[in-house]
Image (spheres, grey):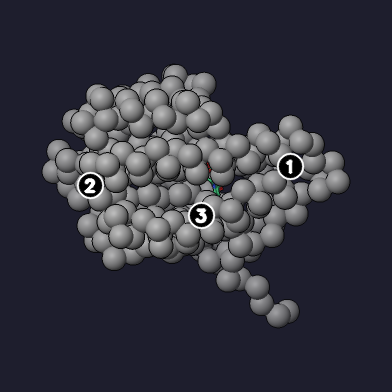
Protein backbone atom coordinates (compact mmCIF):
# COMPACT_ATOMS: atom_id res chain seq x y z
CA UNK A 1 0.00 0.00 0.00
CA UNK A 2 1.18 3.52 -0.65
CA UNK A 3 1.23 6.11 2.11
CA UNK A 4 3.50 7.89 4.54
CA UNK A 5 4.64 4.60 6.10
CA UNK A 6 4.87 2.61 2.89
CA UNK A 7 7.34 -0.30 3.15
CA UNK A 8 7.86 0.12 6.91
CA UNK A 9 7.32 -2.61 9.49
CA UNK A 10 5.87 -1.57 12.85
CA UNK A 11 5.48 -3.42 16.14
CA UNK A 12 2.59 -2.10 18.22
CA UNK A 13 2.43 -3.60 21.72
CA UNK A 14 -0.96 -4.27 23.26
CA UNK A 15 -2.67 -3.74 19.91
CA UNK A 16 -5.57 -6.11 20.59
CA UNK A 17 -7.65 -3.20 21.91
CA UNK A 18 -7.96 0.54 22.51
CA UNK A 19 -5.29 2.99 21.44
CA UNK A 20 -2.91 0.23 20.29
CA UNK A 21 -5.51 -1.25 17.97
CA UNK A 22 -6.28 2.14 16.52
CA UNK A 23 -2.59 2.91 15.91
CA UNK A 24 -2.08 -0.48 14.26
CA UNK A 25 -4.97 0.11 11.86
CA UNK A 26 -3.93 3.70 11.13
CA UNK A 27 -0.31 2.70 10.42
CA UNK A 28 -1.59 0.02 8.06
CA UNK A 29 -3.72 2.62 6.25
CA UNK A 30 -0.50 4.64 5.86
CA UNK A 31 1.17 1.63 4.19
CA UNK A 32 2.98 -0.12 7.05
CA UNK A 33 3.07 -3.86 7.74
CA UNK A 34 2.03 -4.44 11.34
CA UNK A 35 3.18 -6.82 14.06
CA UNK A 36 0.12 -7.02 16.31
CA UNK A 37 1.31 -7.89 19.81
CA UNK A 38 -1.10 -9.21 22.41
CA UNK A 39 -0.77 -10.73 25.85
CA UNK A 40 -3.86 -12.89 26.34
CA UNK A 41 -6.59 -11.79 23.93
CA UNK A 42 -5.98 -13.57 20.61
CA UNK A 43 -9.53 -12.67 19.54
CA UNK A 44 -8.73 -8.96 19.91
CA UNK A 45 -5.47 -9.39 18.00
CA UNK A 46 -7.27 -11.27 15.24
CA UNK A 47 -9.85 -8.49 15.07
CA UNK A 48 -7.03 -5.95 14.58
CA UNK A 49 -5.48 -8.17 11.90
CA UNK A 50 -8.83 -8.51 10.11
CA UNK A 51 -9.38 -4.74 10.16
CA UNK A 52 -5.92 -4.27 8.66
CA UNK A 53 -6.44 -6.89 5.98
CA UNK A 54 -9.81 -5.39 5.05
CA UNK A 55 -7.86 -2.29 4.04
CA UNK A 56 -5.63 -4.35 1.75
CA UNK A 57 -2.66 -4.22 4.14
CA UNK A 58 -0.68 -6.92 5.94
CA UNK A 59 -0.33 -7.91 9.59
CA UNK A 60 0.98 -10.78 11.69
CA UNK A 61 -0.03 -11.50 15.28
CA UNK A 62 2.51 -12.43 17.96
CA UNK A 63 1.69 -13.37 21.54
CA UNK A 64 4.19 -11.65 23.83
CA UNK A 65 3.85 -10.46 27.41
CA UNK A 66 5.97 -7.31 27.43
CA UNK A 67 6.80 -7.75 31.12
CA UNK A 68 8.87 -10.82 30.16
CA UNK A 69 12.27 -10.26 28.57
CA UNK A 70 12.23 -13.53 26.61
CA UNK A 71 8.86 -12.59 25.09
CA UNK A 72 10.20 -9.18 24.06
CA UNK A 73 13.21 -10.78 22.36
CA UNK A 74 10.90 -13.19 20.54
CA UNK A 75 8.64 -10.32 19.44
CA UNK A 76 11.52 -8.50 17.75
CA UNK A 77 12.92 -11.75 16.32
CA UNK A 78 9.54 -12.60 14.79
CA UNK A 79 9.39 -9.24 13.03
CA UNK A 80 12.83 -9.76 11.51
CA UNK A 81 12.32 -13.42 10.63
CA UNK A 82 8.83 -13.11 9.17
CA UNK A 83 8.98 -9.59 7.73
CA UNK A 84 12.68 -8.94 7.14
CA UNK A 85 13.16 -6.20 9.71
CA UNK A 86 11.39 -3.68 11.87
CA UNK A 87 11.50 0.11 11.53
CA UNK A 88 8.96 1.41 14.06
CA UNK A 89 8.24 0.40 17.64
CA UNK A 90 5.19 1.66 19.52
CA UNK A 91 5.38 0.94 23.26
CA UNK A 92 1.67 1.12 23.94
CA UNK A 93 0.90 -1.78 26.32
CA UNK A 94 0.01 -0.45 29.75
CA UNK A 95 -2.01 -1.14 32.86
CA UNK A 96 -3.09 0.83 35.92
CA UNK A 97 -4.01 -0.21 39.44
CA UNK A 98 -5.67 2.23 41.82
CA UNK A 99 -4.81 2.26 45.54
CA UNK A 100 -4.08 4.77 48.29
CA UNK A 101 -0.30 5.11 48.52
CA UNK A 102 -0.17 3.36 51.92
CA UNK A 103 -2.03 0.34 50.55
CA UNK A 104 0.11 -0.28 47.47
CA UNK A 105 1.42 -3.85 47.53
CA UNK A 106 4.69 -5.07 46.12
CA UNK A 107 2.66 -7.25 43.77
CA UNK A 108 0.75 -4.27 42.34
CA UNK A 109 3.92 -2.18 42.11
CA UNK A 110 5.70 -4.93 40.16
CA UNK A 111 2.69 -5.56 37.91
CA UNK A 112 2.43 -1.91 36.81
CA UNK A 113 6.14 -1.13 36.60
CA UNK A 114 6.98 -4.39 34.83
CA UNK A 115 4.49 -3.75 32.02
CA UNK A 116 4.59 0.03 31.69
CA UNK A 117 8.29 0.70 32.20
CA UNK A 118 10.47 -2.41 32.33
CA UNK A 119 8.61 -3.86 29.34
CA UNK A 120 9.09 -0.75 27.22
CA UNK A 121 12.73 -0.46 28.36
CA UNK A 122 13.88 -3.93 27.34
CA UNK A 123 11.71 -4.26 24.24
CA UNK A 124 13.26 -1.01 23.06
CA UNK A 125 16.72 -2.40 23.84
CA UNK A 126 16.11 -5.48 21.66
CA UNK A 127 14.58 -3.33 18.91
CA UNK A 128 17.55 -0.92 18.94
CA UNK A 129 20.23 -3.64 18.97
CA UNK A 130 18.87 -5.13 15.76
CA UNK A 131 18.78 -1.73 14.07
CA UNK A 132 22.27 -0.84 15.31
CA UNK A 133 23.70 -4.13 13.99
CA UNK A 134 21.97 -3.65 10.62
CA UNK A 135 22.92 0.07 10.51
CA UNK A 136 19.28 1.02 9.93
CA UNK A 137 17.40 4.07 11.26
CA UNK A 138 14.24 3.72 13.31
CA UNK A 139 11.37 5.30 15.20
CA UNK A 140 10.24 4.70 18.76
CA UNK A 141 6.94 6.07 20.05
CA UNK A 142 5.96 5.59 23.68
CA UNK A 143 2.35 5.98 24.74
CA UNK A 144 2.93 7.55 28.12
CA UNK A 145 0.23 9.77 29.64
CA UNK A 146 -0.46 13.27 30.86
CA UNK A 147 0.53 11.57 34.14
CA UNK A 148 4.16 11.54 33.07
CA UNK A 149 3.95 15.08 34.55
CA UNK A 150 0.59 15.57 36.18
CA UNK A 151 -0.38 14.09 39.56
CA UNK A 152 -2.99 11.32 39.67
CA UNK A 153 -3.81 10.71 43.34
CA UNK A 154 -4.32 7.04 44.27
CA UNK A 155 -2.43 5.91 41.16
CA UNK A 156 1.13 6.37 42.36
CA UNK A 157 2.46 3.26 40.61
CA UNK A 158 1.02 4.44 37.29
CA UNK A 159 2.54 7.93 37.71
CA UNK A 160 5.93 6.49 38.67
CA UNK A 161 5.88 4.31 35.54
CA UNK A 162 4.86 7.12 33.18
CA UNK A 163 7.24 9.59 34.82
CA UNK A 164 10.01 7.06 34.20
CA UNK A 165 8.92 6.82 30.59
CA UNK A 166 9.35 10.57 30.30
CA UNK A 167 13.05 10.40 31.19
CA UNK A 168 13.46 7.20 29.19
CA UNK A 169 12.57 9.13 26.02
CA UNK A 170 14.76 12.10 26.86
CA UNK A 171 17.79 9.99 27.72
CA UNK A 172 17.49 7.73 24.71
CA UNK A 173 17.02 10.65 22.34
CA UNK A 174 20.61 11.58 23.20
CA UNK A 175 22.02 8.05 23.01
CA UNK A 176 20.13 6.98 19.90
CA UNK A 177 20.32 10.19 17.86
CA UNK A 178 23.72 9.26 16.39
CA UNK A 179 22.19 5.95 15.22
CA UNK A 180 19.44 7.78 13.33
CA UNK A 181 16.80 6.52 15.74
CA UNK A 182 14.23 8.96 17.14
CA UNK A 183 12.13 8.50 20.27
CA UNK A 184 9.12 10.52 21.35
CA UNK A 185 6.27 10.21 23.80
CA UNK A 186 2.59 10.74 23.25
CA UNK A 187 0.84 11.83 26.44
CA UNK A 188 -2.91 11.27 26.10
CA UNK A 189 -5.44 12.75 28.48
CA UNK A 190 -8.76 10.94 28.86
CA UNK A 191 -9.37 8.62 25.91
CA UNK A 192 -12.40 6.36 25.44
CA UNK A 193 -10.91 2.88 25.79
CA UNK A 194 -11.38 -0.20 28.00
CA UNK A 195 -8.80 1.08 30.53
CA UNK A 196 -11.37 3.79 31.49
CA UNK A 197 -14.34 1.44 31.88
CA UNK A 198 -14.91 2.34 35.55
CA UNK A 199 -14.90 6.06 34.72
CA UNK A 200 -17.16 5.64 31.69
CA UNK A 201 -19.68 3.75 33.87
CA UNK A 202 -19.69 6.51 36.54
CA UNK A 203 -21.79 9.35 35.04
CA UNK A 204 -21.23 12.01 37.80
CA UNK A 205 -17.46 11.44 37.72
CA UNK A 206 -17.44 11.46 33.92
CA UNK A 207 -19.42 14.73 33.77
CA UNK A 208 -17.05 16.36 36.28
CA UNK A 209 -14.12 15.35 34.09
CA UNK A 210 -15.79 16.63 30.90
CA UNK A 211 -16.25 20.03 32.54
CA UNK A 212 -12.46 20.23 32.85
CA UNK A 213 -11.82 19.46 29.18
CA UNK A 214 -11.99 22.64 27.07
CA UNK A 215 -12.87 20.69 23.92
CA UNK A 216 -15.80 19.20 25.84
CA UNK A 217 -15.30 15.54 25.05
CA UNK A 218 -13.05 12.61 25.76
CA UNK A 219 -10.50 11.72 23.14
CA UNK A 220 -10.98 8.90 20.65
CA UNK A 221 -8.29 6.28 20.05
CA UNK A 222 -8.21 7.59 16.45
CA UNK A 223 -7.14 11.03 17.73
CA UNK A 224 -4.05 9.44 19.26
CA UNK A 225 -3.43 7.27 16.20
CA UNK A 226 -3.27 10.34 13.93
CA UNK A 227 -0.52 11.86 16.06
CA UNK A 228 1.36 8.55 16.19
CA UNK A 229 1.23 8.30 12.39
CA UNK A 230 2.77 11.77 12.12
CA UNK A 231 5.57 10.88 14.56
CA UNK A 232 6.31 7.66 12.68
CA UNK A 233 6.42 9.42 9.30
CA UNK A 234 9.19 11.30 7.48
CA UNK A 235 7.41 14.52 8.37
CA UNK A 236 8.67 14.09 11.96
CA UNK A 237 12.26 13.28 10.92
CA UNK A 238 13.74 16.09 13.06
CA UNK A 239 11.63 15.44 16.17
CA UNK A 240 13.18 13.51 19.06
CA UNK A 241 13.18 13.59 22.86
CA UNK A 242 9.79 15.30 23.03
CA UNK A 243 6.42 14.62 24.57
CA UNK A 244 3.29 15.46 22.59
CA UNK A 245 0.30 16.08 24.84
CA UNK A 246 -3.09 15.17 23.34
CA UNK A 247 -5.75 15.94 25.93
CA UNK A 248 -8.37 18.36 24.56
CA UNK A 249 -6.78 21.12 26.65
CA UNK A 250 -7.19 19.32 30.00
CA UNK A 251 -3.75 20.03 31.43
CA UNK A 252 -3.74 23.76 30.64
CA UNK A 253 -7.19 24.31 32.06
CA UNK A 254 -6.35 25.52 35.55
CA UNK A 255 -7.88 28.98 36.02
CA UNK A 256 -8.64 31.32 38.91
CA UNK A 257 -12.32 31.39 39.84
N1 LIG B 1 -7.26 5.63 27.70
C1 LIG B 1 -6.68 6.66 28.30
O1 LIG B 1 -7.36 7.57 28.78
C2 LIG B 1 -5.18 6.75 28.38
C3 LIG B 1 -4.63 7.97 28.79
C4 LIG B 1 -3.25 8.09 28.88
C5 LIG B 1 -2.45 7.01 28.56
N2 LIG B 1 -3.01 5.85 28.16
C6 LIG B 1 -2.10 4.74 27.84
O2 LIG B 1 -2.41 4.22 26.59
C7 LIG B 1 -1.96 2.87 26.51
C8 LIG B 1 -3.06 2.00 25.92
O3 LIG B 1 -4.16 1.95 26.82
P1 LIG B 1 -5.69 1.96 26.34
O4 LIG B 1 -6.30 3.18 26.87
O5 LIG B 1 -5.78 1.67 24.90
O6 LIG B 1 -6.32 0.76 27.20
P2 LIG B 1 -6.45 -0.78 26.87
O7 LIG B 1 -6.62 -1.45 28.18
O8 LIG B 1 -7.46 -1.00 25.82
O9 LIG B 1 -5.03 -1.14 26.23
C9 LIG B 1 -3.95 -1.64 26.93
C10 LIG B 1 -3.40 -2.79 26.13
O10 LIG B 1 -2.20 -3.27 26.73
C11 LIG B 1 -2.25 -4.68 26.71
N3 LIG B 1 -1.37 -5.21 27.74
C12 LIG B 1 -1.47 -5.09 29.08
N4 LIG B 1 -0.48 -5.76 29.67
C13 LIG B 1 0.28 -6.31 28.68
C14 LIG B 1 1.43 -7.13 28.66
N5 LIG B 1 2.02 -7.52 29.79
N6 LIG B 1 1.94 -7.48 27.46
C15 LIG B 1 1.34 -7.11 26.31
N7 LIG B 1 0.24 -6.35 26.27
C16 LIG B 1 -0.28 -5.97 27.45
C17 LIG B 1 -3.72 -5.01 26.97
O11 LIG B 1 -4.01 -6.34 26.60
C18 LIG B 1 -4.39 -3.98 26.09
O12 LIG B 1 -4.50 -4.43 24.77
C19 LIG B 1 -1.54 2.49 27.93
O13 LIG B 1 -0.15 2.54 28.04
C20 LIG B 1 -2.18 3.57 28.78
O14 LIG B 1 -1.47 3.80 29.98
C21 LIG B 1 -4.35 5.68 28.07
SS at badge 3: helix
User: Disc number at residue 135?
Assistant: 2
Report crowding for label 2: few under 14, some 14 to 19, many 20 or more residues within 10 A (C-alpha). Answer: few
Give the residue displayed 71% in from the left and 39% down from the top: 109
* Residue for badge 1: 98
- Where residue 148 sits in the image (x, y, percent)? 59, 57
Give the residue displayed 27% in from the left and 30% down from the top: 80
- Where residue 97 sits in the image (x, y, percent)? 70, 39
SS at badge 1: loop
Judge whether 166 appears above or below 221 on screen. below
User: Disc number at residue 168?
Assistant: 3
SS at badge 2: loop
Task: Please state if 216 lies on the left or on the right of 8 as rendered.
Answer: right
Give the residue displayed 53% in from the left and 66% down from the top: 249
Q: Earlier in the sequence, mark 1 or mark 3?
A: 1
Task: Please state if 23 lies on the left or on the right of 196 as rendered.
Answer: left
> Is the residue marked 2 within 8 Å of ligand 1, measured from its CB?
no
Q: Which quadrant of the rendered structure holds the C terminus? A: bottom right
Amino acid sequence: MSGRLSGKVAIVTGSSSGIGQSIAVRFAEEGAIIVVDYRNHPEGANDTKKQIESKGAKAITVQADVSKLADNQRLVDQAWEQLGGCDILVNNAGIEKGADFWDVTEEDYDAVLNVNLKGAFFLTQFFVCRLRDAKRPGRIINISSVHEDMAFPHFSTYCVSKGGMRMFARNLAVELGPLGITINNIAPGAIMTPINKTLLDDKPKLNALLENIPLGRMGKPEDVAGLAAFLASDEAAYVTGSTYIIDGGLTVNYHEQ
